[in-house]
Image (cartoon, rainbow, N blue to C red):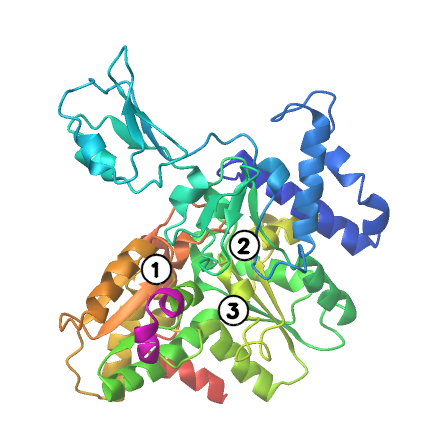
Amino acid sequence: MNYTFDTRVQELKHKVLKEIAKSYYQGTLNDDFFDIPKKIVPGPKPTMRCCIYKERAIVLERMKLALGGSKEIDNIVEVIKVACDECPLGGYEVSDRCRGCIAHRCQKACHRDAIKFDDKTHAAVIDKEKCINCGMCAKACQYNAIQNYLRPCEQACKVHAISMGEDNAAKIDDEKCIQCGACVYQCPFGAIMDKSYIKEAIDIFKDSEYGKKYPVVAIVAPAISTQFKYGTLGQVATGLHKLGYSEIVEAALGADMVAYNEAKELAEKGFLTSSCCPTFVEYIKKNFPTLIEHISTNLSPMATIAKWIKEHYPATKIMFIGPCISKKKEIMLDRVKPYVDVTLTFEELQALFDAQDIDISVLEESPFDNASYFGRIFARSRGITDAVREGLKEHGIEFDYQPIAADGIENCRLALLKAKAGTKEFNFIEGMACPGGCIGGPCSLSHEVRNKADVDKYGMEAKSQTIVDSLKKLEK
């Protein structure tokens, strides 16, 4: 293995996915099922937990999620409760910075009577039974002595969908969750994980006789330009062919189609929010329902190009590969379901490579060029903005284009609040849930590097430098 992961949690997740895929390829999964935890946690000493038996029990739960998780839970993201028992309780606490002052502003600010004072030290004490974590006491304290010690998963979730359950384990409110996946990457114990459909992908490979019986197409997200640094994109393409994909199509080609159509729709309607990021769309639907009518009617780039392929080649099976968890939810939508069969992440693709002993660094290169510069830069923040501007230009449309690019849910929220208030500052919102855009996706091989320059370099390498040139390829 000539690559490294950011954390041991990610490495453990990879080991599980790899062993599941390897056994399923070989047809021995049922026989190996209870041996896999022993292989991953051989013992005799535990590496991270109190004992190897608990470690193996957690691995077993990871395996269940790697095989699709609970059918009773509709969410793509699930909590592994047995792994979520070592996080300290979160919430507001008084630190040793408290001076026991006589002003008692913190107590005055609390409307729940949750703050008392120690008789000896005179320091403030928070009654956890009464506290609702509103934070008013922290704002009032002049010594900054009251801090909000949120659990990492709660801090990562910007829509407040995670709380502490009665068993002290993390609990996800599916009504609020937008499947951004931030909690999956941020949990230090790996106690939150996305469901995997790697088994369904292998089923398609086997049933198609690895692309010989019917075509199996990989639609690859442009964020791949920042991944698989131990090989070239051409070598990744060859690796995909070795897995059983008949054709590799850039999702960026779908992005070209979207940018061209979205530019025209924006000019017709006067105000629009992008529809490329399924998490951003879900965020609007759940938190800004009055803005739903302004969401672009275009399918995402993935779904757009998948629809075109299915309409022209109905027998084809299509898999999307990218850094995104919410894509797994998107393909369950009625308007997308007919076009995309399986979604895989970059993490899962690496697991498939390793399960089949495919080292892309030693492979020859295969062609990897479907899209334009503008379709490829969808992977980073402001990419959609620039592509829509180009779309207006190539349509020959005169329009006073005033875009705003928002990456990360907090920035998206600020832009949407202004739109809800009727601002005239902008007439197009590019919304991307992940910091930096898709290159900051939760299921990237590396989350630490969000290199915009890699995306731009990938864009400049495209043979088609205009959207129209790229779309002409579809005519052929």
Give the overall secondary structure of the magenta segment: helix
SS type, badge 1 = loop
Location of residue 171 with respect to 224 vertically, above or below: above
Q: What is the distance, in whole Å, between disc 2 and disc 3 at their CAs?
A: 17 Å
At label 3, counting other C-alpha atoms closer than 10 Å, the crowd grade (few under 14, some 14-19, many 20 or more) is: many
The N terminus: image quadrant: top right
Name the mark nearer the viewer: 1 or 3: 3
Between 75 and 95, the residue placed more toward the observer is 95
Q: Which residues are magenta?
A: 284-295
Which residue, given by chain and number where applicable, does mark 2 sit on?
Answer: 346
Secondary structure under badge 3?
helix
**Residue placed under numbered mark 1 in the picture:** 380
Whether residue 64 is visible here, answered yes or no, is: yes
Q: Is residue 463 left or right of residue 263?
A: right
Q: Position of residue 198 (x, y in %)?
A: 66, 58
- Give the residue drawn at x 24%, y 20%: 97
Residue at left 44%, top 74%?
Answer: 300
Report the amino acid beneath label 3: Glu
Outermost top residue: 120
Mark yes or no: residue 357 visible.
Answer: no
Find disc 3 in the rendering and name its residue. Answer: 330
Which class describes the residues within 10 Å of circle 2: few (<14), some (14-19), or many (20+)? Answer: many
Residue 223 vertical placement versus 16 (above, below): below
Disc number placed over residue 179 in the picture, else none: none
Q: Which sits in the foreground, 361 or 295?
A: 295
Q: Earlier in the sequence, mark 1 or mark 2?
A: 2
The number of numbered discs placed on residues in the rendered structure image is: 3
Q: Residue at x 28, y 18 (%)?
A: 96
Instruction: Tell which of 244 and 319 is nearer to you.
Output: 319
At which x and y percent is residue 88?
A: 47, 29
Q: Earlier in the sequence, mark 2 or mark 3?
A: 3
